[in-house]
Image (cartoon, rainbow, N blue to C red):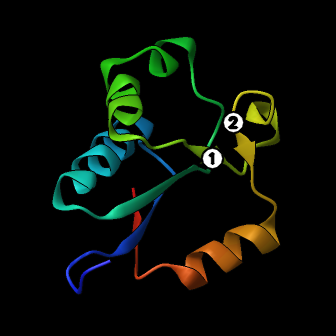
Amino acid sequence: MSNTEKNIMVLSRRDPLEAMRIAAGLTIFGHSVRLVFMGGALSEQEMQSEHAELLDLAGIEPETTNGQMAELLDHLKPAALAAAINESDGVISI
């Protein structure tokens, strides 16, 4: 990783579509990006949106802290989330 490439974590707390857009956009600059959905469960419409397709194209596999979404996405327990945040070069909360 070069000096300009960063490990960035995007925490989706209130606006999952915007979080998806931002996370995918950050990969354009060569950053390694993790996206964690922390709010309520995503709707079917959000899961099938073009923003979700951008994540796939960017190679981002979202994670969640929401137990209702654990069957669809990797589930992060509090200690794992804290460790991931600590290891990140930057955190963006949306």
Q: Which residue is rendered at x = 41% and y = 59% of the image? A: 33
Q: Is residue 46 left or right of residue 25?
A: right
Q: Residue furthest front?
A: 1
Q: Which residue is rendered at x = 71% and y = 27% of the image? A: 72
Please determine whether, in this image, residue 53 is positioned above or below residue 86.
Answer: above
Distance between the alpha carbons at the discs numbered 1 and 2:
5 Å
- Front one among 4 and 38: 4
The disc label shown at residue 63, or none: 1
Look at the numbered discs 1 and 2 and tell me whether their residues touch, using CB distance below 8 Å: yes
Q: Is residue 58 left or right of residue 45?
A: left
Circle 1 residues within 10 Å: few <14, some 14–19, many ≥20: many
**Label 2 secondary element:** loop
Sequence-wise, the earlier of marks 1 and 2 is 1
Q: Which residue is mark 2?
A: 73
Circle 2 residues within 10 Å: few <14, some 14–19, many ≥20: some
The disc label shown at residue 40, or none: none
The N terminus lies in quadrant: bottom left
Q: Which residue is rendered at x = 17% and y = 61% of the image? A: 29
Kindly identify the amino acid type of the residue bearing the numbered disc 2. Answer: Leu
Where's residue 75, x and y in %? 76, 47
Where's residue 65, x and y in %? 72, 51
